[in-house]
Image (cartoon, helix red, strand yellow):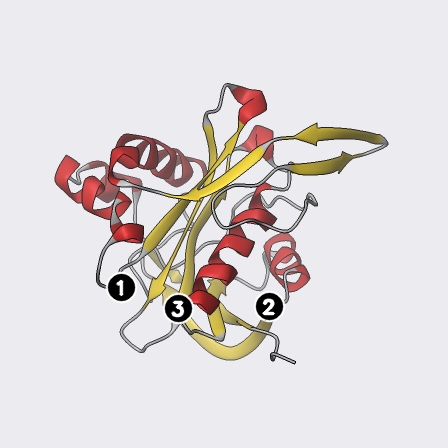
């Protein structure tokens, strides 16, 4: 399991729909009940200058869903600016590291409204980690688009399989990931930040090229 290993236990999940993601940004339309409205949603990898934004949204996620991640708010809050800068710059690093993406909704002053991370663990698995969307933006399509960004990055790096961890009793999260093509496999482990919580692994396999 990577540092922030869990992305789904206890978190709010966005089930909105949008267009397929572009490599650096995305313009999408979403359906909200009976109203159709256009949302300009940008999904992009972080760069070093994003460190403060990444830190702020990460800490907000840890406060909102403390049992959803493998690291505590207290631990993350004590990390230095240098550590956050390194984390934010990981997507552009020359050697593979855990990369992060941010979601921005230009209809909300261009502020970051979601995040996700992914990277290779010690067993060589490409892990999806740390996904979170602000409560007011759940239903905007951001979560699905963030997952699509990770899928695209995995395939680009030659990984045909992505794994994540989720508590099966969190039906909403499990359903969301199943809708994104993930399936449960028979692998379990304790959540690093809350060892009393057992989480199950899910996997996504990239479609075979035709």
Q: CA distance from mark 3 to mark 1?
A: 9 Å
**Which x, y percent locates residue 77?**
23, 36
* Side of 189 where 136 appears, left or right: right
* Side of 67 where 8 appears, left or right: right
Q: Is residue 80 above or below residue 5?
A: above
Q: CA distance from mark 3 to mark 2?
A: 19 Å
**Which x, y percent locates residue 167?**
52, 62
**Which x, y percent locates residue 47?**
30, 41
Q: CA distance from mark 2 to mark 1?
A: 24 Å
- Say what secondary structure mark 1 lies in: loop
Residue for badge 1: 96
Dot placed on the residue nearer the N-terminal end, 2 or 1: 1
Mark 3 and mark 1 residues within 8 Å of each other at the beta carbon: yes
Give the mark toward the camera: 2 or 1.
Answer: 1
Q: Is residue 8 visible?
A: no
Residue for badge 3: 157
């Amino acid at each position: 399991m990577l540092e922030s290993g869990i992305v789904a236990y206890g978190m709010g999940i966005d089930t909105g729909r949008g267009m397929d993601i572009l490599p650096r940004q995305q313009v999408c339309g979403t359906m909200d009940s009976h109203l159709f409205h256009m949302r300009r949603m940008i999904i992009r990898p972080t760069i070093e200058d994003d460190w403060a934004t990444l830190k702020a949204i990460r800490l907000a996620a840890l406060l909102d869903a403390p049992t959803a991640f493998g690291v505590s708010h207290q631990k993350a809050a004590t990390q230095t600016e240098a550590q956050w800068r390194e984390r934010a710059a990981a997507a552009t690093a020359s050697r593979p590291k855990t990369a992060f993406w941010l979601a921005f909704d230009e209809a909300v002053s261009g502020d970051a409204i979601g995040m996700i991370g992914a990277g290779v663990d010690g067993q060589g698995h490409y892990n999806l980690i740390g996904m979170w969307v602000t409560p007011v933006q759940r239903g905007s399509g951001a979560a699905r688009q963030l997952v699509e960004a990770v899928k695209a990055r995995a395939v680009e790096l030659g990984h045909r399989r992505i794994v994540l961890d989720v508590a099966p009793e969190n039906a909403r999260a499990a359903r969301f990931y199943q809708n994104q093509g993930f399936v449960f496999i028979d692998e379990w482990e304790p959540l690093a930040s809350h060892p009393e919580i057992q989480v199950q692994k899910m996997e996504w396999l990239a479609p075979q090229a035709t």
